[in-house]
Every structure is written in C-alpha cells, then in structure tokens.
Amino acid sequence: MKEKLPLNEQDVKKLRKHLIPVVIFPFLAVGMFYGFFALFFNDGGGSALLQNDIAIYIFIGFSLFFFGVIAYMIWSFAIDLRRGFKYRIEGKITDKKLRVSTSGTTSTRGGGSSSRTSRYYYLYIDGVQYSVDSLDYGKVKVGTEVIMEKAPKSNVTLLLELSKQDELSAEKISEANSNKGKFLESKIREVQFKEEDFTALKRGFRSQIRSRIVWLLPFVFIDASLIISEMHGILIFLFPLVIIPAYQLWKLMREIGRYNSNKLYAIKQGVPAIIEDKSKFSSNRSDSSNNVRTTQGNFKVTDELYNKLTPDDKIILFKPAKGNQFLSLVTTDSEEFYLM
C-alpha cells in the first residue's frame, strides 16, 4: 500500500541534514582541484597541458558532468522541501539485494591503476524495488511487515520500521524463542550415505583441492626458482615464502585424508538449523549468487532452493561425520538439496 503524506518537522530536518554535505562538497572539490593544478604548474607541466586541446576538452567535459550531478542532487532536495510531501509504503519484505559495482581507472602518471567500488542496497516490498542505505538494509529481514517513508525526488529514506501487525508481544516472542531453542537442541541424527552424497562429497573435495593448489603453486614456483638459481639463502630472510606453501601442503594432505575417511565411513550427521535471513548478490566482477543466513552459517544456494526458503524455517543440515563442510540441506517438506 502506498499513500501520500505531508512532511513533518523531523522529515525536513533529515532532508536538510542530507543536503548540507551535498552543498559543501563542490567547494571542497574545487579546493582540491586548485591545489592539484597549483602543484602541477609548479612542476612545469601545466603549460604543456593547456596546449593540449584534447586534455582541455576532457577536463571541461568532466567538470560539466561532475557539477551537473551535484546540481541535480541539490535540485532534488530543494524540490522535496518545496513540495512538502512524502510517500508512505506499507507491505512485506519479499526480497533483499546487494549490488556491487567496481570500475577501474588508470593513472596517467606512473602507469598505476586504481579501482572504485560502489555498493547499492535494495529492499523489495511486495515485489517492488526500493533503494536504501546499508543500515536500513541490515535492519529488516525477508518476510517482515514494514512501514517505509521515502522522499519522492531525492529518494531519501525518511523512516523504516516494523508495522504494528508485525510487532509481537513479549509473550509471543518468548514462546517463539523457546520453540526455536528446543529445535536447535534436538538430537543429531546419523544417516548412511546415498549415491548422491558420494557425488557431492567428491565435488566438494575437488573444489577444496583446486583452492589449495591455486595458493600453493605460485610459492612453489618462486621457491624452486630461488633454489635452482642457488639463491636459497634468501629464503631464510623471506621465510613466509616457505611457511605459506608448507601450510597449504599440510592442508592439502589433510583434505585428502578427510575425504578418504568420509568415503570409507559413509555416514552423514544431521544438524538442526533455522533460517535467519536471505538475500541476493550481484556484481560486474563476479557471478551473481543467492545467499541464505542460518544459525549454522551462511550458504550459497540455487534459485529453486532460495525461493523455497523463508526466514524462521526449520531445516536440517547434513555434513560428513569426519568433516565440518555441509553436504546438503533438508527443508520442512523433507526435500533434500545439495550445497556442494
């Protein structure tokens, strides 16, 4: 449900609080640019830059874009304050999403490169996407009923809180926590491996081995090169070059031993857990994922399993008897999904 309401005194204060840094920032930016160019001209490179038409056009274009963005932000806050209204949205959080955007830039001096990472947080209320800050994103979980107030032009979140129908009494909260506690303390059960368990165990083992080898090989190559070049004395001073591959080799041998033990023992243990929250992740540098947070840790899951799970669901997580990495997850309707 979405309705239009007038701004109150607290809303106006919050909008002005957001507006002040936006107004001050251009003056700070101009001061930084002035200091940079003053230093640059003192080095004798300023005149050459001014004679380069392309450099001048790039600088003018960047300046227009930069100050255009700042001007739009100031204008949007001013419009919200002048119009004097906000939107109140009531509904259920149906999903959460974190999007990470990484952009790379190359420095003209020294050839070095740097990157800029931005994080964008979104809540879905009854399927409609709204942008929020990180604090509001972590404040609520999927499945809760909320009230959110947004400024229409600047998109500032003025309020985000649980709705009255989602606020439980102290007695109900105590009863719910007691039921969760009893479930989490329930007896761990052991089950014989199925064919699918052996397959999942093998997938997990291969993934662990690849990870260890990726860490191991570069150090082995460096160490071998130093020894062949009869420069092994350097390894005494650069001892991490020996310690790190030795540790990774030890971890590799332990993974092999654990895998063989689990294959022979062929028993998995069921650990009770409760879904606490779930969210989606996307990035322009890595694959998207569906993440589920439980009382036993965080897991990446498939789209099918993600859509089946909701916060407060009681689940059983199965892991090999000789290890700590979970193999599969059993839902409330006794469907089993493999995590490896």
Image (spheres, rainbow, N blue to C red):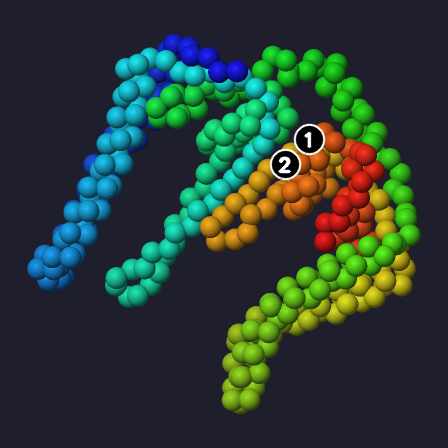
Q: Nearer the viewer, residue 144 or 180?
A: 144
Residue at 50% x, 18% y is 89
Q: Nearer the viewer, residue 193 or 236?
A: 193
Three-letter code, disc 1: Pro
Mark 2: give few (<14), some (14-19) or many (20+) Cα within 10 Å: many
Q: CA distance from mark 1 to mark 2?
A: 7 Å
Q: Is residue 304 above or below residue 176?
A: below
**x%, y% of residue 324?**
77, 52
In the displayed structure image, the side of residue 333 where residue 144 appears, left or right = left
In the displayed structure image, the side of residue 112 where residue 38 appears, left or right = left
Q: Can the viewer see residue 182 in this picture? A: yes
- Residue 142, which numbered label? none
Report the residue marked by disc 2. Answer: 278
**x%, y% of residue 58?**
19, 52
Q: Can the viewer see residue 41 in this picture? A: no
Three-letter code, disc 2: Lys
**x%, y% of residue 168?**
68, 15
Q: Nearer the viewer, residue 302 or 144?
A: 302
Q: Quadrant of residue 63?
A: top left
Q: How many marks?
A: 2
- Looking at marks 1 and 2 on the same chain, the residue that comes earlier in the sequence is marked by 2
> Of helix, strand and loop, which one carries label 2?
strand
Q: Are marks 1 and 2 in contact (CB under 8 Å)?
A: yes
Residue at 79% x, 55% y is 323
Q: Is residue 132 above or below residue 336?
A: above
In the displayed structure image, the side of residue 96 where residue 296 appears, left or right = right
Residue at 60% x, 67% y is 215
Q: Quadrant of residue 252?
A: bottom right
Mark 1: give few (<14), some (14-19) or many (20+) Cα within 10 Å: some
In the displayed structure image, the side of residue 124 where residue 252 appears, left or right = right
Report the residue marked by disc 1. Answer: 311
